[in-house]
Structure formats: C-alpha cells, structure tokens
Image: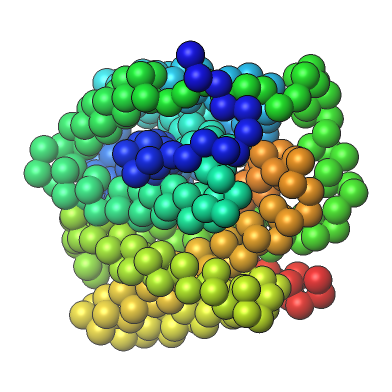
Amino acid sequence: MNTIQDTHNQPGPALTMLLAGTAGLGAASLYYAQPMLGTLASSFGASEQRIGLIPTLTQLGYALGILLLIPLGDRHDRRNIIVLKGSLLVLALLAAAAAPSLPAMLAASLAIGLTATVAQDAVPAAASLAHEARRGKVVGTVMTGLLMGILLSRVVSGVVAQQFGWRAMFVLAAGAVAILVVAARFSLPAFAPTTTLPYASLLASLRELWQRHPRLRQAAVAQGLMSLGFSAFWSTLAVMLHGAPFHLGSAVAGAFGLAGAAGALAAPVAGHLADKHGPGRVTQLGAALSALSFAAMAAATTLAPQPQLLVLALATVGFDLGVQATLIAHQTIVYGIDPGARSRLNAVLFVGMFTGMASGAMLGSLLLGAFGWLAVCLLAMSVSLLALIVRRRA
C-alpha cells in the first residue's frame, strides 16, 4: 500500500477530478433543499419560519462537523475518513428522502451537514498529493469543484424536484455520493498522519490559533458576515418566488444557481488580483460588491415582477462573485499564517463561515415571514457593509 508522507507524488487528472467531485458533491449536499423549500413547506404543512430550520440545521451541522471532525485529518488516514464520512453521508441523504415528517427531516438535515464535511477533507488531501510547484493549481481545481457543487446543486435540485418530486432528488444525490465513495476506496492512496496529538489537544490548538493570530480572527469574522448575507438570500429565495406576486416553482429558483455559477467562474480572477494588489484589497472589493448587489435587490422591490427578476439575476452574479472572491482572498491570507497548521487554520476559517451560514438561514427565514423580502435584502446589505468595515480595519 502506498502511503502519502510528503509532496513528491503527483496526482493525475483522474485523481484530481475524483477529489474535486468529492468536494463538489459533499458541498452540494448542503444546498439541495434550498430551491425545494416551498415544496417541502407544502409537503409537511410547515410555516415559512419552521421550514427555514432545514437549511439552518444543515449549515449548523456543517459548522459543527468542521470544528469537531476536520482536525481528525491531521491525526488519521484521510482516505479512511473520506470513505467513512462519504458512506455516512449516503445514509443521511437516504434518511432525508424517506423522512415522513418535518422533525425527521430536521434530524436528517443535521446529519447531512455533519457528514458533508467530507468536502473539506478532499482539499487538504489534494494539497498533500501535489508537489509544491503545482499545489496551487491542484487545490484550485478541487476548490472549483467545491464551489460549482454549491452553486449548481440548486439548479439540479430545482429541476429534479419539479419533474420527479423532492424525495427523488435526495435518492439521486445519495447514489452519486455512493459511486464516489467506492472510487475513493480503491483509487486514493493512504495518507500518513501529520501529528500524534490526542483529539482533545487537536481541538485545544484551534483556540490557541484563534488567540494567537489576529489575521485569522479578522478573516473568520469577515467571511462569517459575508456568508450570513449569502445564506439569508439563498435560504429564502425559493420561498419568496413560490409566493405572490411571482408564483414560480422550484426549477426557477434553482435556475438562479446558474447566475451564481457565473459569479463563481469569474472568481479565480481574484487570485490574480490578490497576487498583484494583495489579498486584503480583494476582500474589501468583494465586500463592497456584495453590499452594492444587495442594495440593488432592495431597490428592485419597488419594480414590477419581470424587471425585479432581471435585477435579481444580475445582482446574484454580483454578490456571488463578491463572496467567492473574498473567500479565495481569505484563504490566501490564512494559509500563509502557519504552513504547519493549515488544516486547523482552514477549520477555524470555515467554522466562522458556516456559523454565518446557519445564522443567515435562521434570520433570513424569520425576517421573510415577519417583514418580507425587503428585510432580507437589507440584512444582507448590512452584514456585507460590516464585513467591509472589518477588512478596512485589518
């Protein structure tokens, strides 16, 4: 059995794409439900506030999984972790497909969030496999898979749910992950642990890193704020479009993922800008672009339905580009802090990010039910401006 202990091995295109697919399908599992929330609310007879608990618990589970499970990648063979988590994710997705009630669906959503962290195991695995001279390209390919999984998941789930029902989407997702689990078991090499620290010490080191590095704190807080607005939008969009005056189905809500994907595809330009002008400048530009995009959405609430949909689509490209560019720049900042602790630094950054995601899902649903879509847009705009303030003080 080959064991990866250093970076002198080179992953071929097939292995790189396997890791990109693992990251993409893992992250996608977090978002399949979002375009279907209107349909799920009708199926379970739930209010807007109660159905909003589905994305809230999914994002919360992901944040907890990053905090409690990702550090294990430094202590144990990542191949075994990827296979085990992937298998558990298959079971969680099947549990969601079979959920007879909202409480059962909420439990499955939490389990999906915990096990979908397999996406974050694929990224350091790619970094370990790649030679230093090609590490950025290999990790970038895997991160592209992750981002496209997040954004295109909404397109796929919206169409599948409208044509075949929401339960079919979870079954399809479980089947896709199962195929990758089998491929990972027989294609990935074993990975040697990089530390012998016991589990409690691994978790304690996260706190030490947080206290020691102000750049890490600023990155986690700013990305968390950006993610709060991102999640508030995506967690409420389907419900908003499902009601008056639009009365649109899950396929249309999912199609907005194409606009988001356009923003994500343009986001790699942020890497070039970060090299040329510094990642701090890119984070400020990304936060400002997101704030302007959400301000445009808020202003568009005074328009007729068709013009408002056009503004929504264009602004979705803008804020997704802003959020993804900011994330890439923050990862550049964080990975440069301590090369020997990249997995744990990444864990801290993504805990901040997905804590913001969970908070955004909850607050967005509450505001939509109590005050309407304008309140959601204003919330997203406000937290983007707060992220800009945090970055300007960095």
- Whether residue 356 is visible to the viewer of this picture, yes or no, is no
Total marks shown come to 0
Q: Residue at x 71, y 39 (%)?
A: 344
Q: Residue at x 16, y 43 (%)?
A: 160
How is this picture coloured? rainbow
321 vs 271, left or right, is left
Q: Residue at x 48, y 56 (%)?
A: 137
- Whether residue 205 is visible to the viewer of this picture, yes or no, is yes
x then y, percent, for residue 22:
39, 36
Residue farthest to the left, as pictured: 163
Q: Give the answer, above or below, for where 154 lies relative to 392.
A: above
x then y, percent, for residue 200:
80, 20
The foreground one among 96 and 339 is 339
368 vs 121, left or right, is left
Picture quarter with the C terminus: bottom right
The foreground one among 104 and 88 is 88
Q: Give the answer, above or below, for where 309 lies relative to 22.
A: below
Q: Residue at x 57, y 27 (%)?
A: 4
Residue farthest to the top, as pictured: 1
168 vs 80, left or right, is left
Picture quadrant where residue 175 is located: top left
x then y, percent, for residue 346:
66, 45
